Amino acid sequence: MEGGGGILPEKLKEESQSGYVLPTSREAGGLKKSSWGFLLTGIAGGTLVAVYAVATPFLTPALRKVCLPFVPATTKQIENVVTMLRSRRGPVVDIGSGDGRIVIAAAKEGFTAVGYELNPWLVWYSRYRAWREGYFFTVLKCCNFWGASDDAAVGEET
């Protein structure tokens, strides 16, 4: 085979006599490019980016040198806290409030509730949950405990 291994001249002659012509351009009878591959790749890529964007803020605290994982309170734990609070008065402080489940449950019981959280993504999420459930102004603070000033003390309006 000379010339890099192309089609033999005899074979080319037979094909041209049989009326078969190799497609040289993308015509109506030639090969068409499908856009389904691009669409499916775009959907898969977009889904992966969305999952990454949502999961990253909740998973990155586990990658710190000192791991402070977010473990949400169960329904039974929240019920136990609310049962304990029913016989008490005064404000409630939740250090490491996470997504604000206990803070919101205490606010539903009529307490002034404050939650402190290091993870800013969980702070934003707890504020969103409090707003969604109608307790945004009852839950006074959800912020970084170490960055909180004296103005953020329980029971003081800011």
Image (cartoon, rainbow, N blue to C red):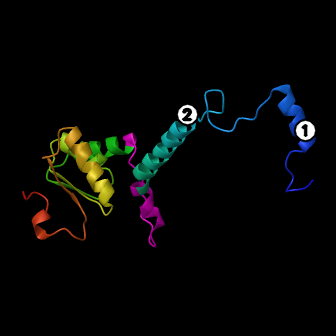
Q: Is residue 51 above or below residue 4?
A: above
Q: Residue at x 16, y 45 (%)?
A: 136
Q: 158 or 7, which lies in front? A: 7
Q: Is residue 129 above or below residue 18?
A: below
Magenta span includes 65? yes
Location of residue 44 in the rendering, given as x and y in whole percent from the top left corner:
52, 42
Tell me where the magenta segment starts and ends, as one range: 57-76
Secondary structure under tag 1 reads: helix
Magenta span includes 122? no
Picture quarter containing residue 149? bottom left
Badge 2 local density, few (<14 within 10 Å), some, or many (20+)?
few
Q: Disc 1 marks which amino acid?
A: Lys
Q: Residue at x 23, y 49 (%)?
A: 127
Which residue bears the numbered disc 1?
11
Left or right? Give the position of 151 relative to 43.
left
Q: 6 or 152, which lies in front? A: 6
Left or right? Give the position of 25 relative to 96.
right
Left or right? Give the position of 112 relative to 143.
left
Q: Disc 2 marks which amino acid?
A: Trp
Q: Residue at x 28, y 42 (%)?
A: 83
Quarter of the picture holding the C terminus: bottom left
Picture quarter containing residue 29? top right
Q: 75 or 18, which lies in front? A: 18
Name which of mark 2 and mark 1 comes first in the sequence: 1
Q: Is residue 96 above or below residue 25?
A: below
Does residue 148 show up? yes
Q: Is residue 26 above or below residue 62?
A: above
Q: Which label lies toward us, 2 or 1? A: 1
Location of residue 153 in the rendering, given as x and y in whole percent from the top left corner:
13, 63
The numbered dot on residue 36 is 2
